[in-house]
Amino acid sequence: MAGKLPASDYPARWWTMLPDGRMECRLCPRFCKLQEGQRGFCFVRQRTGGGMVLTTYGRSSGFCVDPIEKKPLNHFLPGTSVLSFGTAGCNLGCRFCQNWDISKARESDRLSDAASPDAIAATAKRLGCHSVAFTYNDPVIFAEYAIEVAQACRAQGIRTVAVTAGYITDEARPEFYRAMDAANVDLKAFTEDFYHRLCYAQLQPVLDTLVYLRRETDVWFEVTTLLIPGENDSRGELDRASDWFAANLGPDVPWHFTAFHPDFKMLDKPRTPPATLALAREIARAKGLKHVYTGNVHDRAGGSTWCPACGALLIERDWYELGAYNLDGNRCRACGSEIAGRFERQPGTWGARCLPVRLG
């Protein structure tokens, strides 16, 4: 492992000065108000001198080539490889965080790989990756870096993916998503109480992001909800969430229900039973949603893509490994129905491999 990297002093954006002399960060709905030298809740945005800096620009906790299905994205370049990386910090405080060793780390503890936007794009191209994913921690908090990486990737014909909680302001949202080709948005629950009590955040800005993506952009996006026993898995909440989803996002946006495992500060809850995921999928499909998936469990039926018109198996998945593939472009080979997504003529052949990569 290389030595620790010094903090970046890259100028950050989306802030304003308040009449009382404090600096207000305008990137996420926390609106952190900072005195000289203070950092925001995310820890990576710091007031210094007359401005703000992003301390993690050009610095990563590591790179890995993953299957795109791991993000999870099931309707975006199936079977292809994606160069994944994250930095450190997060703008949510989820007690159940499944990546807490990265998202809750101080950047000096985790960041040991240096990479410029051009280097990331060139590496993705050299490795044959079709896309680059900002993941492991939330790319919203390193938006300047993510946007510049995305621009470098587009110049190389590489697409970019944001794996995010969608916790971003109206002010910053358009520029951030204009740079992205795809996203997976983590809808953690469907109550303000859950977000306030377990994430130290709010639900409404996340719903606003989802509606924005659906109505104002051509970004391909899918949604993931981690079901936690006794917290967000009741039939009533799943009914309400599915109704909202159908009314505001429509039937074609894929929704992934994934299984919780005890981690970080939530060790008192059991793993999610597979039957809970199956029930959630059944409820959402009964509301008219066409593509509902289960994850973090071995469930061939719940992980595969089926034609909503004729019921044919379109993309068979065994964990992240693709099997039968019955799409002709974006149409069902059996009945010709159009399937929503971003599909190439042939699926990728990356499989389930995860390949660590060093750039710096």
Image: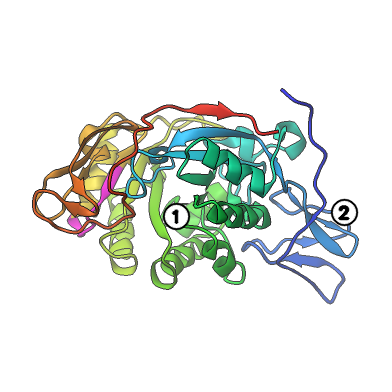
Q: Is residue 231 left or right of residue 45?
A: left
Question: Helix or strand or loop: what does disc 2 sit on?
Answer: loop
Q: Residue at x 69, y 41 (%)?
A: 115
Q: Amino acid at mark 2?
A: Gly
Q: Is residue 96 visible?
A: no
Residue 185 percent location from the top left of the image: 45, 53
Q: Give the residues in magenta.
A: 286-293
Q: Is residue 288 magenta?
A: yes
Q: Which residue is mark 2?
A: 37
Question: Residue 111: x, y in percent?
Answer: 71, 35
Q: Viewer-proximal residue, 356 or 244?
A: 356
Report the residue marked by disc 1.
Answer: 182
- Residue type marked 1: Ala
The residue depicted at 54 percent of the width and 43 percent of the height is 135
Q: Quadrant of residue 296?
A: top left
Quadrant (top left, top right, bottom left, bottom right) of the C terminus: top right
Q: Secondary structure at mark 1?
A: strand
Q: Give the label on residue 243, or none.
A: none
Question: For the point 61% across and 53% down, which residue is it?
Answer: 146
The percent coordinates of residue 186 (x first, y second) are 46, 50
Crowd class of label 2 (few under 14; some 14 to 19; many from 20; radius 10 Å) = few
Q: Is residue 216 magenta?
A: no
Report the predominant secondary structure element of the magenta stretch.
loop
